[in-house]
Structures are given as C-alpha cells and as structure tokens.
Amino acid sequence: MKKRFLLYFCLLITYFGLQAATPPIGSEPSKVLYVDKTRPSAFKTIQAAIDASSQFKSAIILIGPGLYQEKLYITRNNLSLVGSSLSDTRIEYAQLRNNWREQHDSDWGAAVINIAGSDINIVNLTVTNNYGRLHNTHDHQFAIRGFENATRIILHQCDISADGADTLSLWNKDNGLYYHSYCSFTGATDMVCPRGTALIEHSTFFNLKQTATLWHDGERDPEQKLVVANSTFDGVKNFWLGRHHYDAQFYLFNNQFSKNLADKAIFKKTYKDASRNRNNYYGDRYYFYANQSPMDFPWLATNITQAQHTQFTEPSLEQWVFKNNWQPSKVLSELQQEIQNQQFKSEPFTL
C-alpha cells in the first residue's frame, strides 16, 4: 500500500510539472560530486549526479570536459553546476517548445536546463538548444527555463544560446532574483526575459532576428527591475533593444551598442484585441546612463542624473538592485574557494 501511494504521489508531481513546489533539501552534510566521462569513479551524466545529490543539504557538481547531450531537471535547492570552462564543457540538446507541448501540459522539460529550485549556480558552462539550426526555425526554444518558485539563480562565465525565442527564461513573478555576469547570450525574440528582478553585468548579447533582445515582467512589485550594465549588444541589422507585455522597469548603464541596433525604443506590446492587453500600473520606466552607440538615437540618451546613478552604484550596484537581501558576489567567492579546495581544474572566476 505504501509503495502504491508513493507511486501515485510521484505521478501527480510529474503531471503538474514539478514546478508547483520544490522538494525539501536532504539532511546529509554538503557534498561535492564529480561528472567525468573518463574517470571510472565519476558519474557519466550530469543528471545522474543531480539525482544522487538529493540526500545532501547542498551539493556542488564538478563537470569535466566534454559534450553532454542531455536535458537536465533540477528539482532541489542549493545546487551548483561548475564546468571546467565554457569552451570545453558543453551541454547541448535540441528541443522546440511547440513540439514538447504537443505531448505535455506544461513547459517542464521544454528547456535544456529546467529549474524548479532556488539557490542554483551555473558556472563555466556552455548551454545550447540547437533545434533551430537543425530545423531552420526561430520559434520558442529554451536553453534555460526557471519556474514559479525558482529564485536566487546565478549564471557566471557561461555561454547560453538558442536559435529562437526565449533563450533564457527565468519566470518567478513573485520574488524572482537573478544575477548573470561575464556571460554571452544568443537567441531571437525576447531572448533574455526575466520575471522579477535581474542584474546582468559584463556580458554580451547577440540577437538573431529583427525583434526584441530584452524583455521584462515586473508587474507584481514596483521595485522589480531588469538592470544591464557594462555589457555589449549586437545582432542582425535592425535588431530591437527591448519590449514588455506586463509592467516592466529597465535600467541600462554603460553599455555599448553596435551599428546594427534599430531606431526603436523599448516599448510595451499591445494588441488590437484589447482583452489581451495588460494594465500599465506604473507607467513607462526606461532609464539610461552613459551608454555608447555609433547611432545617435534620442531615446538611448542618458535620462537620469549623475547623482541618481551614484545612488544606484554606491556602495555597489548589486546592493541597490537586490536591496541587501542577496549577495551573489559573495556566493561566487565562496563557491570559488570550495572549488580551489577540491583542486578541480577549472577556469578561474572573474569577480
């Protein structure tokens, strides 16, 4: 009877997409696990290591060089995936969202990396959804998809790419917090599209289509924002900078834009069918400071004062964005120290 109940429970969790509630973390002390195709004692797939980590309070999975053609499901908290470097540790899978949804009731499983947990760190990895190049389409194809309860997600020194819309989709509307640094992002429509609050620094964006690069949903709280700083934007000729369907707040500081950027300001998408349009509670909120572009677009000009910018960046941009509720730079520093203690050969962190 007990076995039958457990089976029924597991089926219910699978049916509802696993994103409804993240299972509790284990009770065993924290653990470092290894994935290496050439090391006899190591796991041979990343998912096998993730599954084996469920009994531990927190886990670091160190991933050796190689191409891992698998789809990942993260259903625990306090997990770090660390590759040796983004150039030689690659996760690749071809998946079109529409194809997935023909057989499934939710997006759980539609991405290369599917996240239903919090305090997740992904470092020194290339993550690619290559469906589009194989089938010549720019339709929705997630590289990484975060679900409703997933928050405090860090991407550091990663190459995240897909050949279509919504490459990086972290979708916790209520309290999502995300930090991405020294990453590259490639995709098409709304390719980086956080819900909640996100800070992206020292990164590159390349848009494959004449559509929006950035997208944001911040309708649940007027403090929610998408901040991009010290980064570069490029793409096909006349690619757009950004748009939103819900209330949103964009800050762009000290970025560089290529000559391919279209003369099209960030805008709220509306439809002829008024029933599809969302309320705009907080008004248009697009803020720019010291961005550089070979094109002299008035809408891209600085529109906040130096005093305001200083207020945002002192003592640090991170502290302003996350209101001292989360310190991703500290998380990365501690993670780097643990990796060094393990003597794992990996690309040094840029902090």
Image (cartoon, helix red, strand yellow):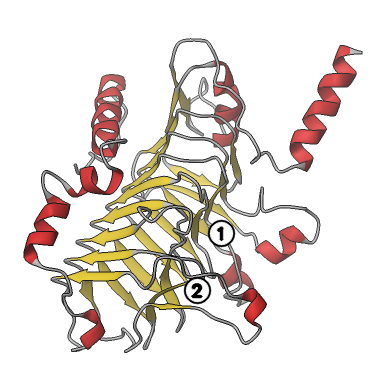
Q: At 26% across and 30% down in the image, what residue appears?
A: 336
Dot 2: within a 10 Å radius of its alpha carbon, few (fewer than 14), some, or many (20 or more) residues? many
Horizontally, residue 116 falls left or right of residue 83, namely: right
Measured as percent of width and height from the top left, residue 66 is found at 46, 44
Q: Nearer the viewer, residue 18 or 94?
A: 18
Q: What is the secondary structure assignment of the residue under circle 1?
A: loop
Check the picture and name the quadrant holding the N terminus: top right
Label disc, if present, on residue 156 of the rendered structure? none
- The kind of residue tagged 2 is Thr
Q: Residue furthest front?
A: 281
Dot 1: within a 10 Å radius of its alpha carbon, few (fewer than 14), some, or many (20 or more) residues? many
Q: At 39% across and 82% down in the image, what residue appears?
A: 239
Q: Is residue 208 visible?
A: no
Measured as percent of width and height from the top left, residue 158 is found at 36, 50
Measured as percent of width and height from the top left, residue 215 is found at 44, 67
Mark 1–mark 2 Cα distance, whole angstroms, equals: 11 Å
Q: Is residue 103 visible?
A: yes
Label disc, if present, on residue 189 of the rendered structure? 2
Q: Nearer the viewer, residue 290 or 235?
A: 290
- The kind of residue tagged 1 is Phe
Horizontally, residue 166 falls left or right of residue 62, namely: right
Residues at badges 1 and 2 in contact (C-beta under 8 Å)? no
Mark in the foreground, 1 or 2: 2
Number of numbered discs on residues:
2
Q: Residue furthest top?
A: 28
Q: At 18% across and 89% down in the image, what residue appears?
A: 296
Quickly name the residue at label 1: 142
Horizontally, residue 117 falls left or right of residue 223, namely: right
